[in-house]
Image (tube, rainbow, N blue to C red):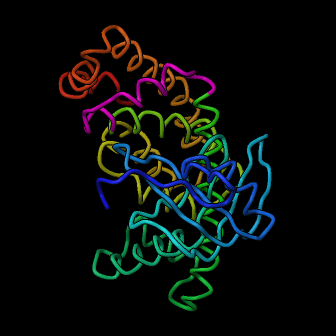
Amino acid sequence: MEEEDFAPLPLTDTGIDPFEADDINRALIPQGLVYSSGLGHFRKPHFVLAELKRAEVREGVQVLVAGCEYARDLIAPPAAMRDGAIFLRMDAVRRLLWNKYEEWQWKEKDTALGRAFAHYDFERDIERGLDRMAEAESEAMILHEIGEARAESLLGEDWNAMLGQLTSRHAELLARAVRDHLADCLVTLPTLLEREAIGSLHFYLANLSGLRRALFPTLPQAYEAWLDSRDTAKLARTVAAAEAHWLNAARRLMTAYHHNPAHGDAALNALAAGDLASLKL
C-alpha cells in the first residue's frame, strides 16, 4: 500500500482528490464533519476525519475546530494551516498535554512546564486542569497559526517556493524555526502578554527547545527576569524588538536560497553551520 497512489474520495460521481480539503469539506461540514489533509514536515502526508466542534473566522482566516477523531494517520499535529484555513484538533491537543504531564512527573518540578501545570491546578483536579489547559493552549495554537498567516503575507510566495523545494532536513528545520519565531513575535507572544495569559506563557517557554531555543536565547533570559519581577515590560520589549529581527532573518534565508536554488540547501546549511550566530537574537 505504501507505494500505491492516493485514491479519490467517493463524495461525488467522479471522486475528489484527498488533498482537496476545501472541496471535501463543502460536502462534509453540513453533516457535522470536518476533514483535513496536507503535507507536514519533510513532506509527509497527513489526513484526519473528525467531528466538527465549531467553525469561526479570525482576522479573515477560517478556523475549523475538530472534536472526536474518527480516522487519522499516526502523526497528529494539534494545529496547522491548510489551504488558507486553520485546522485545530482538540483530541490531539489533549493528548499532547497529557503526554507532557506524564513526562513531567519524572522530571524536575520547578520548571516552566511545572509552573504551567501549577497554574491550571493539576494537583487539585487533574481532569478540570486538563480541560482548562486544553482550551487555553488551543487558543495559543490558533494565535500561532494566525501569526503564520501574517508571516506568509510578509514573506510572499518566494518563501513557500523555497520551503517546498528544500531536501535537507536541517535546512528545513532552520527555515521553519525562523518562521515560527516570526509568527510568534507578530501575534502569539504579544497577544499572550497583552492578555496576561500566564499559564500559556509558561507553557510556551517550556516548549522552546532545540534549534528554536538556540536561535532565540534572549527570550528565556527575559522570561527568567519576568519570573523575578512579574513586570512584563522587559519581556514585551524583547518580543517587539525580535519581530524585525526574524523578518530580516527569514529574508536572508530566502536570498541565500534563491541566489542559486540548485545549491540552496547547501547555502542554508552553511548558514546554520558557520553563521548561526548572525541569525541569533
The quadrant the N terminus occupies is bottom left
Q: Is residue 128 magenta?
A: no
Relative height, residue 161 to residue 218 (above, below): above
Residue positioned most to the front: 13
Name the residue nearer the viewer: 79 or 34. Answer: 34
Q: Residue at x 77, y 60 (%)?
A: 55
Q: Residue at x 46, y 24 (%)?
A: 161
The quarter of the picture where residue 149 lies is: top right
The quarter of the picture where residue 110 lies is: bottom left
Q: Residue at x 24, y 33 (%)?
A: 168
Q: Horizontal placement of 5 versus 269: left or right?
A: right
Q: Position of residue 102 (x, y in %)?
A: 37, 81
Residue positioned most to the bottom: 124
Relative height, residue 219 to residue 18 (above, below): above
Name the residue nearer the viewer: 169 or 125. Answer: 169
Q: Which residues are magenta?
A: 153-172
Relative height, residue 52 to residue 194 (above, below): below
Q: Position of residue 228 (x, y in %)?
A: 48, 57
Q: Residue at x 61, y 40 (%)?
A: 147
Q: Horizontal placement of 188 versus 264: left or right?
A: right
Name the residue nearer the viewer: 250 or 123. Answer: 250
Q: Horizontal placement of 227 versus 107: left or right?
A: right
